[in-house]
Image (spheres, helix red, strand yellow):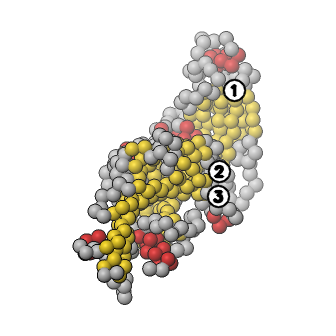
Amino acid sequence: MKLSHLMIAAAALAIPAAASAHRMWMLPSATVVSGTESWVTVDAAVSNDLFFFDHQPLRLEQMKVWQPDGSAGQLQNGSTGRYRSTFDVQLNKPGTWKIGTAMSGVMGSFKVNGEEKRVGGRGGPPRPGMPAPLTVADIPADATDVKLTESSTRNEIFVTAGEPTTTVFAPTNTGLEMAPITHPDELVSGEAAKFRFLIDGKAAANLKVTVIPGGKRYRDAEGAMELTTGADGVLSVTWPSAGMYWLNATATDAKTMTPRATQRRMSYVTTLEVLTP
Amino acid sequence: MRPSSLVLLAGAVSAPAVAGTVTVTVPRLNVAEYHRPYVAIWLEPVGGGAARTLAVWYDVKKKGNEPGTKWLSDLRAWWRKGGRSLKLPADGVSGATRTPGQYTIPLPADIKPGQYVLNVEAARETGGRELVSVPITAAGGRATGKSELGAVAVTR
């Protein structure tokens, strides 16, 4: 498979392949609102430059809303355009809401009679003229050179009506997760924020985390901060200025669940709003 | 007794004498589209601790789909430091937005002795936002905003 093809497949599935620099992101219209009459509207897309939708929309099929008590909330007015999806959430209960997706899949290749075939790839509806992608179940018993990688991605944002709460931070203890110490809706420029990262519920030490400010089109440099968590899995970020920031943590290990898979790739994405003091 | 706690204590002792006041100036601005600003006035203990809101001026009467409370979070610093936990309208605290001019409100009589900073934050629709902080000393305090607020004075 050609590289470009792989990149498109990865972006559409929103599973980060090493070859792909495309970033999936969600951008809420606000993260802090007063009262319980307010709505937030969210843009969701996959692109290189943050936060400009110019490549692919993020699909809404898997998008979920968590109310402040942790129960399922409602996504409204969802729409997917050429470059972005948008949807609304009515924040009709006080506290901190979570909005996002958790996706996982298996990608890789195997050989039958010397011919290489690929597993996994593009999600969503079938494309005309293209065969449906093979799955792990399609790998015959006599296959050789089986190379399988599990991928999982969490992409979530937090919005707060009134006083912030923390119920929606409760970890599921599977894969890569963020357990905020500083509330993500209480970020202020010039102040350090701390977030703990977990892999399968345990502190993720020495985890690589990239933090990139939005507004890429209006400056020359990417402006990315390349950070690492400490031994306790805690990341400390000091925000240089107010604005929207994209945060991405990635990890790779060999703790796979799928038979014959050798590697597990995990990614965590969130968008954080930093306000002036 | 440290001088800083002198006046703030004054209300607590029986002599009513001179109560402290805060004077805030809402400036007259020469702009095409003017809306009266939302303003919050609050005290913060210097060593940290709960902020105490003395006044918040907003569109108290606006109801419906977009009630006046919707834009309270635009007073970002006040919102984070305690505004969001305040039940509004609050007696003696919330009030309507003010036209340009000078307004004087009393410092509450029951404030515990200690060091305080008085904060005034203003946010205006189609306009800017400004935060003016005045450390309160024995002599009171004074500061002047640059855009959305004029002189802020604490007397004691």
Q: Nearer the viewer, mark 1 or mark 3?
A: 3
Q: Label 3: chain?
A: A
Instruction: For the N terminus of chain B, give its image quadrant.
Output: top right
Residue position for label 1 = B136
- The x, y position of residue A12, in whole percent, is 43, 72
Q: Label 2: chain?
A: A
Q: Earlier in the sequence, mark 2 or mark 3?
A: 3
Q: Nearer the viewer, residue B52 or B98?
A: B52
Q: Nearer the viewer, residue B81 or A208?
A: A208
Q: Relative to B18, does residue A88 appear above or below in the rendering?
A: below
Q: CA distance from mark 1 to mark 3?
A: 40 Å
Identify the secondary structure beneath mark 1.
loop
Residue type at mark 3? Gly
- The x, y position of residue A35, in whole percent, is 46, 48
The numbered mark at residue A223 is: 3
Residue type at mark 1? Ile
- The x, y position of residue B15, in whole percent, is 63, 12
Q: CA distance from mark 2 to mark 1?
A: 29 Å
Q: CA distance from mark 2 to mark 3?
A: 12 Å
Badge 3: residue crowd in 10 Å (few <14, some 14–19, many ≥20): few
